Amino acid sequence: MDKLFIAGTDTDAGKTVVSVTLLHALQAQGRRCLALKPVAAGATWRLHEGQERWMNDDAEALQQALATTSHQQTYDQVNPYCFAEPIAPHIAAEHAEQELVLADILQHIRTLEQLPAEVLVIEGAGGWLVPLNAQQSMADIAVQSAAQVILVVGLKLGCINHALLTAAAISASGANLVGWVANQPQPQPMVEQAANIASLEQRLSAPCLGVLPYCPTWRQGHLVDYLATNQLLQSLLAANSSLSPAKKA
Ligand SMILES: Nc1ncnc2c1ncn2[C@@H]1O[C@H](COP(=O)(O)OP(=O)(O)OP(=O)(O)O)[C@@H](O)[C@H]1O
Ligand SMILES: C[C@H](N)[C@H](N)CCCCCC(=O)O
Ligand SMILES: [Mg+2]
């Protein structure tokens, strides 16, 4: 099963928007998908399938993006760690007197890999180095699960530096950046948006897999045409030809 880790230049960059769009795009091509938001910080207590529970909006959007052709995951399968407070996850975990255990997240991923699907889309929380605990970060989930990384660049002033720093950190972690997506998270484009995107294209070695405009109905898959899904699949094929040992197993 191909694993895609959706990283962002920051929180609110558009990782959920891109993850949901990717799920729609891949499923439209007949690929069965699974979704995972391993760690969510920011949840409300609400009714879900006849029961009240804590729910995070990102995880719910991912779950709702699963087509009937894909395995219907439960909320807990999509989101094993869910904290109420919309703050850094390791601090939210501390407040809840819990610990975020990387080994448990990796085991959860292995369990999902037993389900029938071709692609697992994993959405991080915040940016690449957001801590899980004192030792580990989001990056470890991507690296240790041997996922291919897609970087979502939230188009706002400062994004060039954030994107280049994140790409450098991804590379330093030993992960493979298969592509990046430019996302416009607010109605007004940033000043000189096209020039900013061109600057990133010149400096990032991975291909740009799309420029997503602002579209309030993204949950319905209305941004699929802006993603270069075939180019992503080609990049994945190329990455597979040099499979890491963890991926071969
Ligand atoms: N292209 C877009 N069109 C419309 N709204 C967008 C777009 N991109 C982002 N948004 C909005 O901006 C906000 C942040 O986007 P999103 O939730 O995808 O960020 P994120 O990177 O997933 O953040 P987090 O770290 O909290 O998971 C959301 O309210 C989302 O609806
Ligand atoms: C609450 C927010 N939307 C995300 N779920 C978590 C973002 C954590 C950012 C931590 C940090 O980098 O300082
Ligand atoms: Mg999100």
Image: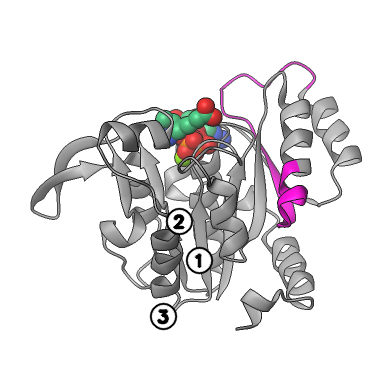
- Going by the picture, which residue comes out furthest to the bottom? 249
Q: Earlier in the sequence, mark 1 or mark 2?
A: 2
- Please report the residue visible at 71 percent of the width from the left and 48 percent of the height from the top: 170
* Whether label 2 touches label 3, CB < 8 Å: no
Q: Earlier in the sequence, mark 3 or mark 1?
A: 3
* Whether label 3 touches label 1, CB < 8 Å: no
| Amino acid carrying mark 1 in the image | Leu
Nearer to us in this view, 99 or 130: 99
- Going by the picture, which residue comes out furthest to the right? 202
Q: State the separation of the CA atoms marked 1 and 2.
A: 18 Å
Q: Quadrant of the N terminus?
A: bottom right
| Amino acid carrying mark 3 in the image | Gln
Q: Which residue is mark 2?
A: 102
Q: Position of residue 104 (x, y in %)?
A: 38, 61
Q: Which residue is mark 3?
A: 114
User: Can the viewer see residue 216 in this picture?
Assistant: no
Q: State the separation of the CA atoms marked 3 and 1.
A: 11 Å
Q: Which residue is mark 1?
A: 120
Q: Is residue 202 left or right of residue 188?
A: right
Region in magenta? 169-192
- Going by the picture, which residue comes out furthest to the front? 134
- Please report the residue visible at 79 percent of the width from the left and 76 percent of the height from the top: 242
Q: Is residue 180 magenta?
A: yes
Q: Position of residue 28 (x, y in %)?
A: 52, 66
| Amino acid carrying mark 2 in the image | Leu
